[in-house]
Image: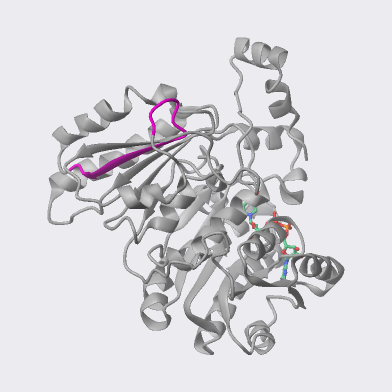
């Protein structure tokens, strides 16, 4: 569904009128394309506190050139901020430059993990979180602001590259912890999933189709899983991507066994994307509406994950990415079933992540999409849809590709230090923020 308001504000009279009326000012976001793989503008590297991070070589490999005129990316290394006094350096570094950041530019704050033995360091580092989220709300013009906690820049390279690229256009106001886990630098950063197999559930259309396409772009052999009723679409998508279609219902008791049987050589990336809504307020919700949503969105995710880990189908170095939702973080009227199922996904990810990594060498993360322009959201009544689109820092809905790019980053062989994270792809939605 086209966002006519976004198109209107992109015209001179539209911008003039909506500004006069104090209405939201969404900017056309710059997204990744083969022709435009990098942000257009220089990268400005700033420091607050006494940092020991070796950041220069990693930043050099992003492909961006160093410079300070209208930077497309500003990286503030604040890992050395150990007390409240040092926070003044955060202000001093960014205050003079925020205005000059290019439209659709990036501000990336780097912090250190909180030190449980030092409440001054913890206070100062936690302060960066409130700072980042607040700056994200101020930034405007399609700019994003995120915080990554890290101790080793090379181990976080895939994360830094993602957040400093057009691939993260709709990811803002996020705090991402990195650490632990193995990192495998790909031979080719343009095809990091070459030689790997990825299975995406619910991939015949919508977000799942975009995920399958993006993982195939990154070199993966994709398996497009969907229900039998969607077989024609699943085959069409698989054919286009040079992959294979697998039709089954993820709620079937033997879904895990059938997936394992279809993948005798194993699996590297498992994306739990299939999901349904059956909205009704709790007072009007029959048990069947409750259980069908819980079954597709949560119980089947648990069952197939358990089966594929137990059978060893997921190879060491593997990735599991589950799809939550901001409805599972913030709650949403009419969605007690859906909100419960998606919050359950978050619980699954946080609990399983350390054990799956220790026991199987597999990372487990979730994406939590906000308002994404799909058939699911096109069905929402006009005024609710319009509110959903605008109630985020970027004042617009995201696209399936935004979720797909985020999943591709989590699936990356060099993202082994990202584990147990729930990353919102929501343009910094006000809901549950
Ligand atoms: P969609 O309805 O367009 O596509 C979902 C796909 O899953 C369909 O192809 C469907 O056939 C398949 N599917 C459903 N039940 C299945 C089952 N039992 N077994 C196998 N396949 C099944 O939905 P979408 O908007 O692309 O959403 C994809 C995921 O993202 C879902 O988990 C959804 O909850 C989540 N999400 C979407 C939004 C949004 O704004 N669209 C926001 C937050 C989260």
Q: Give the range drawn in magenta.
A: 67-81
Tell me what residue is drawn at x 43 percent, y 46 percent. Answer: 174
Quarter of the image with the N terminus in it:
top right
Q: Is residue 205 visible?
A: yes
Quadrant position of residue 407: bottom right
Report whether 429 appears left or right of 176: right
Determine the residue positioned at 61% across, 49% down.
402
Q: Residue at x 23, y 52 (%)?
A: 114
Residue 81, x across and y down, in percent: 19, 42
Classify residue 20 as left or right of residue 416. right
- Farthest right residue in view: 232
Q: Residue 408, image x and y in percent?
A: 56, 60
Q: In this view, does 225 lie above or below 129?
A: below
36 or 297: nearer the eye?
Answer: 36
Height in image: 313 above or below 213?
below
What residue do we see at 53% from left, 39% from top?
Answer: 39
The answer to which image quadrant residue 85 occupies is top left
Indicate the colouring scheme: one colour
Quadrant position of residue 91 = top left
* Image coords of residue 342 (percent x, y): 56, 60
Judged from the image, the quadrant occupied by ligand 1 is: bottom right
Residue 185 located left or right of residue 273: left
Whether residue 291 is visible = no
| Residue placed most toward the observer, 114 or 109 | 109
Instruction: Name the spot of residue 180 as percent of width and height, x first.
Output: 32, 68
Question: Is 76 within the magenta?
Answer: yes
Q: How many marks?
A: 0
Q: In which quarter of the image is the C terminus?
A: top left
Residue in the foreground of this view, choosing between 70 and 167: 70
């Amino acid at each position: 569904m086209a966002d006519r308001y976004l198109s209107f504000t992109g015209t001179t009279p539209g911008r003039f009128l909506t500004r006069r009326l104090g209405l939201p000012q969404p900017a056309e976001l710059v997204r990744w394309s083969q022709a435009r793989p990098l942000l257009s503008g220089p990268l400005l590297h700033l420091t607050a506190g006494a940092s020991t991070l070796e950041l220069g070589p990693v930043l050099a490999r992003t492909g961006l050139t160093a410079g300070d005129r209208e930077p497309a990316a500003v990286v503030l290394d604040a890992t050395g901020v150990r007390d409240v006094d040092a926070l003044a350096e955060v202000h001093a570094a960014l205050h003079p430059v925020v205005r000059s950041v290019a439209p659709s530019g990036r501000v990336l704050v780097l912090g250190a993990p909180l030190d449980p033995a030092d409440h001054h360091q913890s206070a100062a580092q936690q302060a960066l979180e409130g700072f980042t989220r607040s700056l994200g709300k101020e930034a405007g013009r399609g700019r994003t602001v995120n915080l990554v906690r890290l101790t080793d820049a090379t181990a976080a390279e895939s994360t830094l590259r993602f957040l400093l690229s057009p691939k993260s256009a709709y990811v803002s106001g996020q705090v991402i912890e990195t650490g632990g886990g193995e990192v495998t630098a790909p031979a080719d950063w343009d095809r990091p999933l070459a030689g790997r197999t990825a299975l995406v559930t619910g991939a015949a259309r919508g977000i799942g189709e975009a995920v399958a396409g993006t993982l195939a772009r990154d070199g993966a052999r994709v398996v497009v899983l969907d229900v039998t009723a969607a077989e024609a679409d699943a085959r069409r998508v698989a054919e286009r991507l040079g992959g294979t279609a697998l039709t089954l219902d993820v709620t079937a008791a033997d879904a895990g066994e059938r997936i394992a049987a279809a993948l005798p050589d194993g699996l590297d990336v498992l994306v739990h994307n299939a999901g349904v809504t059956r909205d009704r307020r709790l007072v009007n919700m029959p048990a069947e509406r409750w259980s069908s949503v819980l079954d597709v969105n949560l119980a089947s995710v648990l069952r197939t994950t358990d089966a594929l880990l137990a059978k060893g189908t997921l190879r060491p170095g593997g990735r599991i990415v589950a799809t939550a939702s901001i409805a599972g973080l913030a709650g949403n009227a009419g969605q007690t079933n859906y909100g419960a199922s998606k919050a359950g996904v978050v619980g699954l990810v946080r609990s399983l992540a350390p054990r799956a990594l220790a026991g199987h060498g597999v990372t487990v993360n979730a994406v939590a999409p906000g308002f994404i322009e799909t058939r699911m959201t096109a069905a929402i009544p006009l005024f609710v849809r319009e509110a959903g689109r605008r109630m985020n820092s970027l004042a617009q809905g995201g696209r399936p590709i935004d979720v797909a790019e985020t999943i591709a980053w989590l699936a990356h062989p060099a993202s082994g230090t990202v584990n147990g994270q729930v990353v919102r792809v929501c343009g910094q939605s006000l809901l549950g923020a």
